[in-house]
Amino acid sequence: MKGNKRKFSNVFTYAAIFVGILVLLGAVFPDRFGQVSGIVGAWITETFGWYYLTIFTLILFFCIFLIFSPIGKLKLGKPSDKPEFGTISWLTMLFSAGMGIGLVFYGSSEPISHYLAPPTADPETKAALAESMRSVILHYGFHPWAIYGIVALALGYSQFRKGEVGLISKTLRPILGDRVDGPIGTIVDVLAVFATVIGVAVSLGVGAMQINGGLDYLFGIPNNKLVQGIIIAVVTVLFLYSAWSGLSKGIQYLSNLNMILAGLLFAAVLILGPTLFILNMVTTSTGDYLNSFLSNSFDVAPLNDQKHEWLQSWTIYYWGWWMSWSPFVGIFIARISRGRSIREFVIAVLLVPTFVSILWFSAFGLTGLDVAQNAPQIFDMPPETQLFGIFNELPLSFLLSIITLALISSFFITSADSATFVLGMQTAFGTLSPANFVKVIWGLLLSSIAYVLLLAGGETGLNALQSAAIISALPFSVVVILMAIAFYKDANKERKYLGLTITPNKKRMKEYIENDGNVERE
């Protein structure tokens, strides 16, 4: 907003007040807060489970359509724009932005959980193992990355091609017109900010639980809400110092460290685990995932009570978590993808992270299951401790556990630091230099809501986290649908102008390139 001297927008005021009220209610009435969020979350999963599954799958089909459509030839930017990052660095950043703590927390614990309580098979059988791997690939495969991709596409196209500021609301201008500059736009941005806060808070809560679980297993430090609060407080000081001092290089180094540590951990688990079995199952699980893709994408299981209950606990929770993460991840990957073609972008976003996820969960999940067969006590451990119990049965156990703690802590800091920037940008008129006090307030609110959700989550701590993800995703899912429609409307208009088919209109394409995309359009 040119000429505006305010450091923050109305979006900041409304969203911060709303989140602050939630923090206060959760801190004063944690049990009641957990009960209410659980009831609302359960109602949403029961009533809108079909909706979540349908929306995720239709968005994925839309992304696949863009790969083969002439629209895929358009750039996220002006015709003269070149990619800012090399392909390898770009692909690495794509993946690190989207999953983070979830990969470490659920790497072994989710496949084990599905093995013990599968969707349809009998527990602890070969069929259960096959279902376990198929299910975890579904949760971390094409579907979440399609949601991230469409949010990033709409943002990147709006910002780099159309010259809009990087706000979610501005992506809807093709269908809402100048109303995005008024109250409707404010509502959209508040929904995006709320979804981001909850999505990141869920990750921070999960990260605090696993750090505490590792410290308990290795050093006997009590595993309870007080220690988790201390962990959140310590990490909050670290990432707020980074946000305040602008140590962007430090965060860049930490991001690179994340990938190095993750790579070392993956290589170690692959080598120390049942290597040949893992490699064989990578192929088999991928084929199984693709073969059952359509049925599992749409199956709400109304006639199968076992699977219906499983879907509510897992798939619907994940779809809510990924939806609430999409503004944060979308903004990030849009920023690093300027100059890429839409086709190149969609192919990379869908294929690369999915392939890495298959490798990661095959290595950690199958190693965990193999170790647990000989150490059955691992089956009874809570999710935040299971990975450390598995490492205890492998060579170099202490070193692997220390690397894991370092990786979770690094993910925690980088995710929170990046989130404060994204939230600051979204609540300060889209500026790339939000005021420090805005970032600090969001950092404090992020940590506070993460701890409140842990307090309200009962014995496991996960209940309120899961409910919050499901609840925040529902209103923002409407925004994502509108973003997809608005993006297609605008991009298709440009495609028609350029005559982009199998053989484009060369005259108009030449004019388009010579004018760097600044041409009159109907």
Image (cartoon, rainbow, N blue to C red):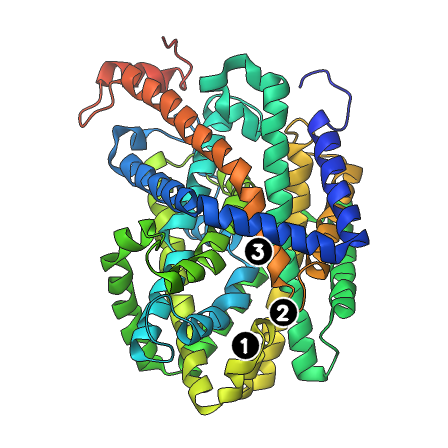
Q: Nearer the viewer, residue 479 or 95?
A: 479
Q: Is residue 228 above or below residue 67?
A: below
Q: Nearer the viewer, residue 436 or 177?
A: 177
Q: Is residue 26 above or below residue 70?
A: below
- List the residue tagged with mark 2: 210
N-terminal of the pair, mark 2 or mark 3, is 2
Q: Position of residue 486 (x, y in %)?
A: 42, 24
Near mark 3 (Cα within 10 A), the count class, few <14, some 14-19 or many ≥20, is many
Q: Is residue 226 above or below residue 331?
A: below
Q: Residue furthest bottom?
A: 374
- List the residue tagged with mark 1: 387
Dots 2, 1 in contact, CB < 8 A: yes
For marks 3 and 1, give the one nearer the viewer.
3
Q: How much space separates mark 3 and mark 1, taking CA atoms?
A: 21 Å
**Picture quadrant where residue 54 is located:** top left
**Picture quadrant where residue 439 is located:** top right
The type of residue carrying mark 1 is Leu
Q: In this view of the protein, can residue 139 be seen by the observer?
A: yes
Which residue corresponds to the image point at 58% horizontal and 75% vertical from the top-left? 382
Q: Residue furthest left?
A: 503
N-terminal of the pair, mark 3 or mark 1, is 1
The type of residue carrying mark 2 is Gln
- List the residue tagged with mark 3: 466
